[in-house]
Image (tube, coloured by chain):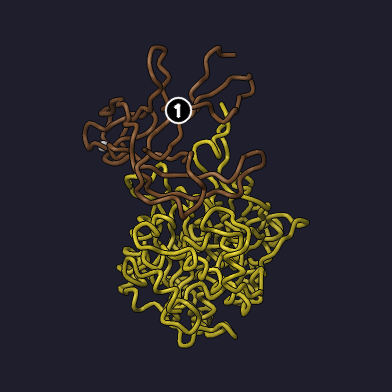
Amino acid sequence: MSAQPLPAVSYLKLPEDGDPYLEGHKCGSCGATFLGERTVCSKCSARDQMSAVTLPTTGNLYSYSIVHRSFPGIDVPYISAIVDLDDGTAIKGNLINIDPDPEKIEFGMPVEVVFDDALGRKDRDGNSYIAYFFQPKV
Amino acid sequence: MSDAYVVGVDMIKFGRFPDQTVPQIGSQSALLALDDCGLTIQDMEALYCGNLGQASGMVGQRILQEIGQTGIPVVNVSNACATGATAFREAWASVKAGLYDIVLAVGVEQMGKGLLGGAGGATGIPKEGLLGSGTMPAVFAEAGMEHSSKYGTTFEQFAKVSVKNHHHSTMNPKAMYQIETPLDTVMNAEMISYPNTKLMCSVNVDGSAAAVIASEAKAKELGLMNRAIKVRASVLTSDPWQERDLVMPDVNSCTRKAVAAAYEMAGLGPDDIDLVELHDCFATAEILHYENLGLCGDGEAGRMIDDGEVALGGRVPVNVSGGLLSKGHPLGATGIANIYEVSTHLRGEAGERQVQGARIGLTHVIGLGSACGIHILEKA
Ligand SMILES: [Zn+2]
C-alpha cells in the first residue's frame, strides 16, 4: 500500500513539493489539447509533436446532467458536468457545492477545479486516491 | 454497378426471451425474412450477422446451425448500436460489388436489464459518479443539454418525443409496448438522468430482424420486383475529430457527415423524405437528429416537436414504429428493424400506422464511440 494517496486518473499529477494539477498534452502542429499521454494527434494526425502542459484551474460549464440513477453503491443525485477550461480543453467531472437543481445551474457559469479525496473510494490494496472536482467560482 | 434491392425483410415482435439462445432468437427473423420473399437458406450465397453481446461467439454460424448449414461464407459484425445497420451495409456492398447475387443480413440481440455504459477501468477505483457519469442516460442527457444551452430546448419538449413515440407504438403489434404515455406521465416518471426520465430511455429488449438483399438481375429472375425496395444510399461514418468528443461523445457530426453523403449518393434532399426511423435511444437524442438529418434548420427542433410535424400525419413522421423508446432497442437488431419498418411503409403494408403515400424513407442509427449508419430506401 502506498503511504501517499494516488491520482484517480493519469492526467492528474501530484507533485511531492507542490499543489496537484491537471496535465494536458498539446499538439505542436495544430494546438489541440488532450487528456492523457499520447504521441499522435487525433485532430491533425501529426506524430511526435505532443508536449505536456499544465491545464488551467478555471473554466466554464458547457453542459451537464443531474444523475439520479447510477450503479449500486454510487451516491445520487450528483451533477455530471462537461467543462471548457480557459485554454479550450474539454474535461468531464462532478460539479459540486451547488444544488442538483436545473433552476440553480447556469450554462456557461464560471467554475474552478478543486482537488480532494476520491469520495473515500479505495482500491483492492487499500490505497486512497485524489480526484478533481468542479465547483462554482466565487 | 447494378442496384441492390431488399426483397425480403421482417422482424420478430420484440420482447424478453431469457429461455432462448441468441442464435435461436436470430434464426426466427431469418426465417421470417426468407418467408417474406418465398426463398430458403439454400438460396442464400452469404450471411452477414450483427450481434454485440456475443461478438466473439460466431452467432452467424450458430444461426445456420439452427436453420441450415449450407457452407456459405458468414461474416459476424459488431459496431455498437450501429451493428445491425453495418451488417446490412456489408451485405448490400457485397451485392453492389457483384460478389454475390443474393445474401441474408440478420441482426440479433439478447439484452440484460439495467443501465448501459459507465463500466469502470480494470485497475484503480471506479470512476462512475466520481468523474461525472459514463452511463448512457447521462451521456445523452448531456448531449441534449448542449441543445438546451444553444437553443433553449425545454424538458417538456424532450418529453414530448416520448409521448409521440409511445403513441405510435400503440399501432405497432411488433413493438415491445402498446401503451399511451401522456406528457405528465412521462415528465413525472422516475428521473434517471435529468432531463431523461425512465420513459425517455429506450427499452432494453431481446429481438432480431433480417433482410434478404438481391441484385436487380436476381430480383427480376425470381419475380420479386413488385414488393422490392431499392437501396438508394448506404453510408457509414465514424466520428470526425471535434473539440469535446473525447469527453463528450458526439452523435451530431458523424450523423451530419453521413446524411450529407447519403443525400448525395441518392441524389435526394431532406424534402424528398416521406418518413424517418432515427436513433431515439433517449428522447434527448431524437431532438438533435431532426436538425442533424436536415429535417429542419438548426435550432428549430423544439418547434418541430411542438407543432406535431414529426408525428404520424405530420410533414415528416419520425419513428412511426414507436422507435427505440417504445418498440424497444435490441442493440444488434435495431439497424435492420428500422429498415423493416421503412420498407413496410414503402410497400403500403403498415396497417393503422401507414404513412400515406410514402415513397422514400430514411433509416439512421448511432453506435456510441462512434458509428453512424444511414440508409435511404425507395419503393422499386
Ligand atoms: Zn494536431
Q: Residue furthest right?
A: B19
Query: Is A32 placed above or below B181 here?
Result: above
Query: Is B103 placed above or below A22 here?
Result: below
Q: Amino acid at mark 1?
A: Phe
Q: Is residue B365 left or right of residue B113?
A: left
Residue B350 found in image quarter: bottom right
**Which chain identifier belongs to the brown chain?**
A
Give the quadrant of the N terminus of chain A: top right
Query: Is B253 placed above or below B267 here?
Result: above
Q: Residue at x 50, y 62 (%)?
A: B88
Q: Is residue A74 left or right of residue B268?
A: right
Q: Chain of mark 1?
A: A
Looking at the picture, tell me which residue is in the foreground, B22 or B134: B134
Looking at the picture, tell me which residue is in the foreground, B348 or B239: B239
Q: Residue furthest bottom?
A: B357
Residue A92 found in image quarter: top left
Spot occupied by residue A102 in the image (x, y as percentages of width and height): 47, 54
Q: Residue at x 44, y 64 (%)?
A: B154
Q: At numbered mark 1, what does the secondary structure look like: helix, strand or loop? A: strand
Residue position marked by numbered label 1 in the rendering: A115
- Hue used for the chain lettered B: yellow
Looking at the picture, tell me which residue is in the foreground, A123 or B150: B150
Q: Quadrant of ligand 1?
A: top left
Can the viewer see residue B142? yes
Q: Is residue B112 left or right of residue B4?
A: right
Cβ of mark 1 under 8 A from ligand 1: no
Spot occupied by residue B57 in the image (x, y as percentages of width and height): 64, 46
Spot occupied by residue B36 in the image (x, y as percentages of width and height): 61, 76
| Picture mark count | 1
Spot occupied by residue B320 in the image (x, y as percentages of width and height): 53, 76
Q: Residue at x 51, y 20 (%)?
A: A6
Can the viewer see residue B9? no
